[in-house]
Image (tube, coloured by chain):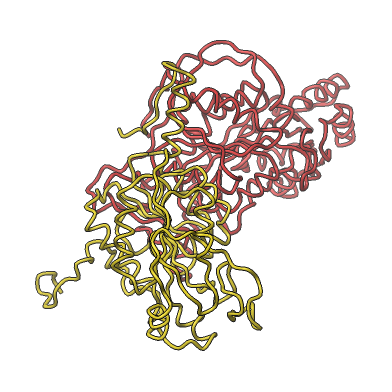
Chain colours: A yellow, B red
Amino acid sequence: MKEEDRLEEKNPIETLLRMDRIPHIWCPGCGIGVVVTSFAEALRKSQIDLDKTAIISGIGCTGRVAGYVKLDSIHTTHGRAVPVATGLKLANPELKVVVFSGDGDIAGIGGNHFIHAARRNMDLVIICVNNFNYAMTGGQVAATTPISANASTAPFGNFEYPFSLPYLAEASGATYVARWTALHLRRVTKSMQEALGRRGFSFIEVITPCVTLYARRNRLGDGLNLLKYYYEKSEIQHGADTRNVDISYQGKLIVGKFVDKEKPTFLDCMNEHLGKVLGNKYKPYGGNHD
Amino acid sequence: MKKVKADPEGVLTGAHYLDGDHALAEGALAAGCRFFAGYPITPSTETAERFSERIPTVGGVFIQMEDELASIAALIGASWGGKKAMTVTSGPGFSLMMENIGLACMLETPLVIANVQRGGPSTGLPTLTGQQDMMQVRWGSHGDYRIIALSPDSPQECFDLTIEAFNLSEIYRVPAFVMTDECIGHMHEKVVIPPAEEIELVERKWYKGPKDKYLPFKPDKDMVPFMVKVGDGYHFHITGLTHDERGYPVINAECQDVCVRHLVDKINMNADKIIKFEEDETDTAEIIVISYGITSRVTTRAVRMARKAGIKVGTIRLITVWPFPEKRIKELAKKIKAFVVPEINYGQMVYEVERCAFGQAPAVHVPHCGGWVHDPDDIFNAIKEASK
């Protein structure tokens, strides 16, 4: 069927998706799709140059996002999206580089890369979809699984302390930190717009339902039940101290924009420092755009 | 293949007294490498140190990453961002890089990795030599793929072969390796860096067609696909999953066959153009000593002793280690008594010689577990024994 013969109205974000790859692989009730919608919306609203925007993903359910968004996109290895993004950004500083991946990818196997990129204030936007478990492989316990929640490799409940990602990000040096749930789509979009419009290491955590695994194994019901949980238990606290935003099993979810501060980025520091020390001999680095 | 002259900015023309590690860095700068990501590891660190000192006045980026996993990952990002990129490491770091060497092969990404080998396994001998990663470079990442690996025998060749590695990696869109060792890495010798206009480089095979028609993995006539860089408006996708020409994942045996066969054939079919080695007196030889890197220099003395003793010895010095000069070994195997293969490991390239000799001539190994080079007498005795 030709495009012009289509009766239905075109989805406004279609131009930002690889429609030849739809339907996607995500389960009914999964929250990743709506985060992608928010991202597409943020791209549209922020009117940034899409030719100069790249998206890098790792491995896992959220790792598949790079494959569906119609930007220059690289689907990398497990945990390594952040260093690939670092190399890309440094090779061509005029790019806006977004890492879109899951909690296992970014904070589990990729945790070391995450904290070091934050430490350097690398100019990257990190969108971390947190569904509290390793979903692609069947619902194993993760570094974010709340204590006492069940997972396929924690069949009697999790007893490990989880990471509180906003706290980890801020402590490591992130200059923008926000957390939302899949219920707060307008706010997710706004945070993404803000992150796309600023410089420095920006971290956005979005808590999403994993209906097939996390919710089923913990008898939490379907997607709607989880959204109800987000509705009832989330509390917006902009500027909250990230030391106090950890998540307990089905407990309160403190969301909001926690950190938004200015600090020179890695490249700012490199250019300023080497310029000061080496004087005229230093070749300021802005990337080669030939 | 578009040839270009080196950018004089990075070329330190003149005669220098350099060690191999520093020569690697100068080779990279001369080749146009403007992105280096690395992690300190003995005995390779001096390359990173040299690059970090030189790059601020040449124009480019040096970044010390959090580990070797990140170093190689950053190279992949930088290469797709349009920069020539390099890292350097040694055994333990090389093991960590294996994961994303696979990704670099799968994404057909040009980049260069130098391995200044030390004795292993594990932490092994950080400050002492070895040639023990020769099979790891070939097979170390999981799955089937091919790479290109070169082995310098001097600081001069560390410079020359790093440029060569960059050229090959750009021509074939594949990771290229400079497999040197602690001895060469820390050996000071005269290194002559020619004027920029005498250094021939290969420009990346840029795609120039319509924006919506770009296929990142569609092989050209020479089997190598065209490349674009992130930020040029192609909105392309690439993935480490088995993929089709568009770069879209396709999870079935048919696509796997096309995808993997391409990675392997791209190098195999071009092997004759890639392979370089030096031959000496092989026409009349009864025994041929095959060696590479530092061991080829020790071999020189052993061969002199053998010739003095009246043994007809020829030599092959491998410059390209992978792909291996299979055809030539096969030919020579029919005419000689035996190959002698000294290397600083407990048997690696000797198995490749044995495979290629196809039972026509034995391949006698002269092992050394690492820590020092062979005693030339050991190689001489092996030659003597084999000639009986």
**Front residue (pair B152, A107):** A107
**Rendered location of residue B33, percent (x, y):** 47, 31
In this picture, residue A290 sits left or right of residue A218: left
On the question of residue B341 being in view, the answer is no
Picture quadrant of residue A234: bottom left
In this picture, residue B304 sits left or right of residue B164: right
Q: Identify the residue at image location x=29%, y=59%.
A: A70
Could you tell me how many numbered marks the image carries? 0
Q: Quadrant of the N terminus of chain B?
A: top left
Q: Is residue B17 above or below residue B236?
A: above
**Front residue (pair A198, B280):** A198
Q: Identify the residue at image location x=64%, y=18%.
A: B18
**Rendered location of residue B201, percent (x, y):** 43, 27
**Rendered location of residue B181, percent (x, y):** 71, 33
Q: Is residue B187 above or below residue A168?
A: above
Name, please, the residue furthest toward the top: B15
Picture quadrant of residue A280: top left
Q: Quadrant of the C terminus of chain B?
A: top right
**Front residue (pair A213, B184):** A213
On the question of residue A225 being in view, the answer is yes
**Rendered location of residue B256, percent (x, y):** 48, 64
Q: Is residue B52 above or below residue B14?
A: below
**Front residue (pair B78, A260):** A260
